[in-house]
């Protein structure tokens, strides 16, 4: 059973591709790439087909994470059927996902920083209008949240030594 994760921000050029890159790197390090698949998307079509912002790419590449292969795309209604977890970077993204979500699938929507409560903020700040330091801050928040998200998924889906066992209710918040 493949577990599918979708990271969502406004334009899919800063926060969500960084989140996807960090998370897929952690998944690969854990030897779970065969069990967990990632993607990222935007709530707006304004940057469809574009690569991540160069500052996002530089920030992740400094840590050995290459996100240059990613391209922006808009979130679709069928994503709620295709993905087990949809992670919004901010409240606006979260509200948009809830408005687009088919009835009965709302349990799949999370705020990314639900998985990093010790940071003390609920939203991943949008670094687009700022400088490199904003991207560094976002990276640190996403790294902590991604590590905790992976731990949550491993518990919920009983991922041990690269094996997953079926758990149809696994995207519930009980261990978030």
Image (spheres, helix red, strand yellow):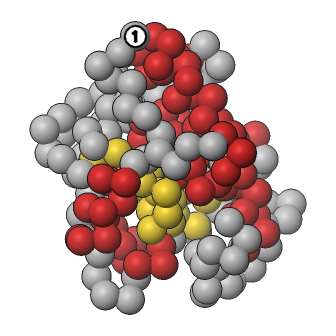
Question: In the image, 67: left or right of 152?
Answer: left
* Circle 1 SS class: loop
Residue 81 in percent (x, y) is at 37, 77
User: Would you identify the image quadrant in which residue 100 lies?
Assistant: bottom left
Pick the residue in front: 99 or 47: 99
Pick the residue in front: 169 or 36: 169
Question: In the image, 105: left or right of 5?
Answer: left
Quadrant occupied by the N terminus: bottom right
69 relative to 162, above or below: above
Evaluate whether residue 41 shows in this view.
no
Tally the numbered discs: 1
Q: Residue at x 72, y 51 (%)?
A: 148
User: Would you identify the image quadrant in which residue 3 lies?
Assistant: bottom right
Residue 93 in percent (x, y) is at 32, 53
Q: Residue at x 31, y 39 (%)?
A: 12
Evaluate whether residue 95 shows in this view.
yes
Given the current orientation, which residue lies at the most extreme left position?
A: 46
Residue 137 in percent (x, y) is at 56, 24
Alpha-carbon neighbours of circle 1 within 10 Å: few (<14), some, or many (≥20)? Answer: few
Given the current orientation, which residue lies at the most extreme right position?
A: 161
20 relative to 135, above or below: below
Quadrant occupied by the C terminus: bottom right
Q: Residue at x 36, y 73 (%)?
A: 80
User: Would you identify the image quadrant in which residue 102 lies?
Assistant: bottom left
Would you name the residue on which mark 1 appears? 131
Residue 9 in percent (x, y) is at 34, 45
Q: Residue at x 42, y 54 (%)?
A: 88
């Amino acid at each position: 059973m493949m577990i599918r994760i979708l990271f969502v921000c406004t334009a899919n050029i800063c926060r969500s591709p960084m989140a996807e890159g960090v998370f897929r790197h952690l998944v690969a390090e854990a030897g779970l790439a065969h069990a967990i698949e990632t993607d990222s998307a935007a709530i707006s079509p304004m940057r469809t087909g574009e690569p991540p912002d160069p500052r996002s790419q530089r920030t992740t590449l400094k840590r050995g994470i290459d996100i240059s292969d990613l391209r922006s795309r808009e979130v679709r209604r069928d994503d709620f059927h295709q993905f087990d977890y949809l992670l919004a970077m901010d409240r606006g993204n979260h509200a948009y996902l809830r408005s687009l979500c088919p009835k009965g699938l709302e349990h799949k929507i999370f705020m990314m920083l639900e998985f990093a409560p010790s940071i003390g903020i609920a939203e991943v700040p949008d670094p687009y209008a700022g400088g490199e330091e904003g991207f560094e801050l976002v990276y640190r928040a996403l790294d902590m949240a991604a590590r905790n998200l992976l731990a949550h998924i491993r518990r919920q889906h009983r991922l041990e030594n690269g094996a997953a066992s079926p758990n149809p209710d696994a995207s519930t918040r009980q261990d978030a």
